[in-house]
Amino acid sequence: MDNIVAEALTAMPVERKDGTYALRIPLAQGQCTPGMMKTVMETMAKFSLTSVRVTTGQRLNLEGIPKDKVDEVIASLGTKVDKVPPTVGVCTGAGVCKYGVQDSRGMGKKLLEVIKANGPYPFKIKSGVSGCKMVCAFSNVRDIGLVGTPKGWDVLFGGGAARNVRAGVKIGTKLGDDEALALIEKALDFYKENGRKRERISGLVDRLGEEALLEATK
Ligand code: SF4
């Protein structure tokens, strides 16, 4: 480990029920380098922390930090952020996974750029890009979901796995990267124009109906 250079991280504090804090550490597509792990492990050893958790959002949560130590722990990790940047959940995808037929990681990067470039939105957006119909990135219950097929991407919009579970509406099928992203931009316009403040896309689709979404994106 001596030949590994520690890498600085960003961290957002979140208060827990018992008064301790967790530090939410964003990762690009859930990937963690040895340098990042070194920073986390050295910080845990220094402050006698015993728990780091991988989240469903492909981030790390460092848990059990006493309130009076939060600033010191953040300084040891790197920099404090007040809000974690948006991410896109991705599966392993083609090129690595033997079932993959589309490059979910490459497409995840492109989708993240589209989401960032078109905001702000009425509320948060969770996305998932899966390289095949096994849908390991939960694309069918995400606000924006992409599912790889041998002939291109199926595009789902308005799914959700929160209070009101709903599958995303299929707004496009067998599309190339650029076609799929252009369709998503159109769907995001529909959300921006019609969504109420703090209304998730699934709530909007429930309120206005799938036909309105399909009409706006055809
Ligand atoms: S969705 Fe398909 S390509 Fe992605 S990890 Fe699962 S099985 Fe592999």
Image: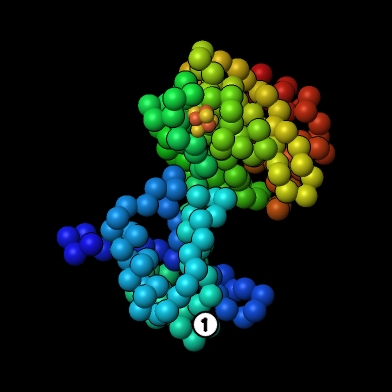
Q: Is 189 rendered above or below residue 13?
A: above
Q: Amino acid at mark 1?
A: Pro
Q: Residue at x 45, y 35 (%)?
A: 92
Residue closest to the eye, 94 or 88: 94
Image coordinates for residue 154, horizontal then vertical, percent: 59, 22
Would you say residue 103 is visible in this rendering?
no
Q: Residue at x 34, y 60 (%)?
A: 37
Kind of element beneath mark 1: loop
Residue closest to the eye, 103 or 195: 103
Residue tagged by mark 1?
A: 66
How is colour applied across the structure in the image?
rainbow
Q: Is mark 1 within 8 Å of ligand 1?
A: no
Image coordinates for residue 124, horizontal then vertical, percent: 62, 50
Determine the image quadrant of residue 158.
top right
Q: Residue at x 45, y 75 (%)?
A: 49
Q: Is 130 rendered above or below residue 48?
A: above
Image coordinates for residue 93, horizontal then vertical, percent: 45, 30
Would you say residue 73 is visible in this rendering?
yes
Q: Residues within 10 Å of mark 1 (few under 14, many from 20)?
A: some
Q: Residue at x 62, y 80 (%)?
A: 19
Determine the image quadrant of residue 132.
top right
The quadrant of the picture occupied by the C terminus is top right
